[in-house]
Structures are given as structure tokens and as C-alpha cells.
Image: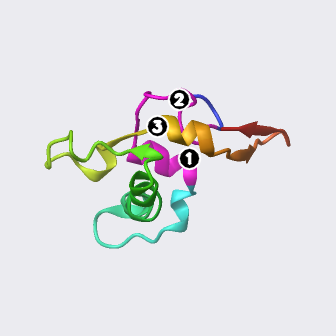
Amino acid sequence: MAENTFLRPTIGEPDTVAEFSELAIPTELFPTRGGLGPRFEACLFVAHEIVRPLSWLGLLDDGNLKQKPHVRLEERLIRKTALFDRFVRLIITTADGGQRVH
């Protein structure tokens, strides 16, 4: 995946929830509870608070209906839809002070 991207720039290229979580928020912000660790906690947060609402709006395809129920949360695939590119513009500040628009 390209550096400093939020979601893959091309419609139809999938990311996993884990990849998306690592790009969206710092996983070290989440406490380790039980044996699952902060990465799982971040994935759970992103899946419920970001992916689910965006899929309700038709901006992300989370593949829930297409995937088998035994797929682990971190491995579920998500991808942008045409509506995402048409209506959403995310401006991400890069490490060198520039900006990247998605």
C-alpha cells in the first residue's frame, strides 16, 4: 500500500480492516485487554465506529454479505465505492508538511 494513504486511491482495490485501522488511527492509543492486544481493539473500534456507518451510507463496501461468517474481523475486506469518490474528500497532512487529497 502506498505511504500516507487513508484508503486505496482506486475504486475496487480492497483493504483489510486491519490495514485500514493502522492508517486511520494510531493503534498504540488502545489498551491491551485480555490476550487480543491493541491492534485488535483498534480494528474493533474502526469496524464499529467508521466502517459500519460508512457502509450504511453506501460509501464503503464492507463485503459482509459476500464473505463467510468465519472470516476474522481484521481480515475482512473493505473498499471504497463510487459514491465515496464522488462525495468525500479527505485531506491528509503528510510528514513533510504537504497534503494528500483522497
At x 14%, y 43%, the residue is 68
Residue 16 is one of the magenta-drawn residues: yes
Q: Which residue is mark 2?
A: 1
- Toward which corner of the image does residue 57 lie, by quadrant? bottom left
> What is the x, y in percent for residue 76?
30, 44
Q: Which mark is residue 23?
A: 1
Circles 2 and 1: CB distance less than 8 Å?
Answer: yes
Range of residues picked out in magenta: 5-24
Q: Which mark is residue 81?
A: 3
At x 35%, y 73%, the residue is 33
| Mark before the other along the chain sequence, 2 or 1 | 2
| Mark before the other along the chain sequence, 3 or 2 | 2
Identity, as a three-letter code, of the amino acid under mark 3: Thr
User: Which is more foreground, mark 3 or mark 2?
Assistant: 3
**Drawn side of residue 64 relative to residue 28, left or right:** left
Distance of mark 3 from mark 2, alpha carbons?
Answer: 18 Å
Label 3 packing within 10 angstroms: few (<14), some (14-19), many (20+): some
